Image (cartoon, helix red, strand yellow):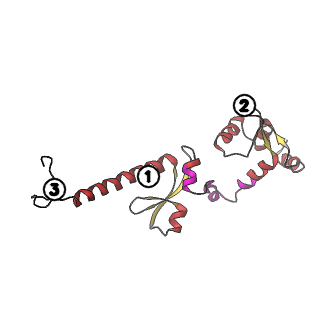
C-alpha cells in the first residue's frame, strides 16, 4: 500500500480507533524499536497501556497520532530545533540525558534559559543547543567559580588590626 493510500484510508477512520504497535509501525513507516524508544522518551504519539502490568498491551489512539503528526510537520529544517519543553526548569526536570535545550551564555560564561535571557535583557554573546549533561556541567563549573570568588572576598574582609598583613595566622 502506498503512502497516499494509507493517508486516504486513515482519513476514513474515527479518531477513537485504537491501533496496535505493528499497525502504527506501518503507518509511521517506523521500526518496532523506533516506536519502543519513542514510548520510552515521550517523543512519539500518545499511547494507551491496556492494564497495569509490564507486559500489558499498548495501543495508539488514531486521533493522538494525528495530533502528534501535525505537531511534527515542518516547512523547513530550521523549524526542527523547537523544544518540547516549556523552559529550562521543565527540561531539567523532564528531559533525558543527551537531549538538547537552547541555552544563552553571557560574557561571564553564565548560562541562561534562552527565553529568560531575552525577557531579562541579558547581554548574550553565544546561543547553543546543548545536551543536558553539558548544561549541568556548566552550572556546576559556574557555581564553583562563584563560590571561589565569594570565599576570596570573605578572606579579604576578615582582617585583624595590629597584624603585619592584617590577617589571622594558624599560630594565633
- Residue 74 drawn in magenta: yes
For the residues labelled 2 and 1, the Cα–Cα distance comes to 39 Å
Label 1 sits on residue = 139
Q: In the figure, residue 82 lies in which quadrant?
A: bottom right
Residue 66 against residue 52 in the figure, above or below? below
Q: Secondary structure at mark 3?
A: loop
Q: Position of residue 107 (x, y in %)?
A: 40, 63
Magenta-drawn segment: 69-92
Q: In the figure, residue 85 lies in which quadrant?
A: bottom right
Q: CB of mark 3 within 8 Å of CB of mark 2?
A: no
Q: Nearer the viewer, mark 3 or mark 2?
A: 3
Residue name at image x 39 percent, y 50 percent: 141
Q: Residues within 10 Å of mark 1 (few under 14, many from 20)?
A: some
Res 53 label: 2
For the residues labelled 3 and 1, the Cα–Cα distance comes to 32 Å
Res 167 label: 3
Amino acid at each position: 500500500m502506498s503512502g497516499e493510500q494509507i493517508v486516504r484510508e486513515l482519513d476514513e477512520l474515527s479518531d477513537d480507533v485504537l491501533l496496535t504497535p505493528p499497525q502504527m509501525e506501518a503507518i509511521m513507516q517506523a521500526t518496532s524499536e523506533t516506536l519502543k524508544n519513542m514510548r520510552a522518551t515521550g517523543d512519539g504519539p500518545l499511547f494507551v497501556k491496556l492494564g497495569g502490568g509490564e507486559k500489558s498491551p499498548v495501543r495508539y489512539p488514531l486521533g493522538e497520532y494525528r495530533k502528534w503528526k501535525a505537531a511534527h510537520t515542518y516547512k523547513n529544517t530550521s523549524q526542527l530545533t523547537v523544544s518540547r519543553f516549556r523552559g529550562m526548569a521543565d527540561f531539567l526536570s523532564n528531559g533525558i540525558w543527551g537531549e538538547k535545550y537552547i541555552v544563552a551564555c553571557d560574557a561571564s560564561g553564565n548560562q541562561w534559559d534562552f527565553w529568560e535571557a531575552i525577557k531579562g535583557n541579558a547581554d548574550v554573546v553565544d546561543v547553543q543547543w546543548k545536551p543536558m549533561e553539558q548544561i549541568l556541567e556548566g552550572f556546576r563549573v559556574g557555581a564553583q567559580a562563584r563560590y571561589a570568588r565569594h570565599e576570596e572576598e570573605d578572606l579579604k574582609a576578615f582582617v585583624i588590626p595590629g597584624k603585619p598583613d592584617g590577617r589571622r595566622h594558624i599560630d594565633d
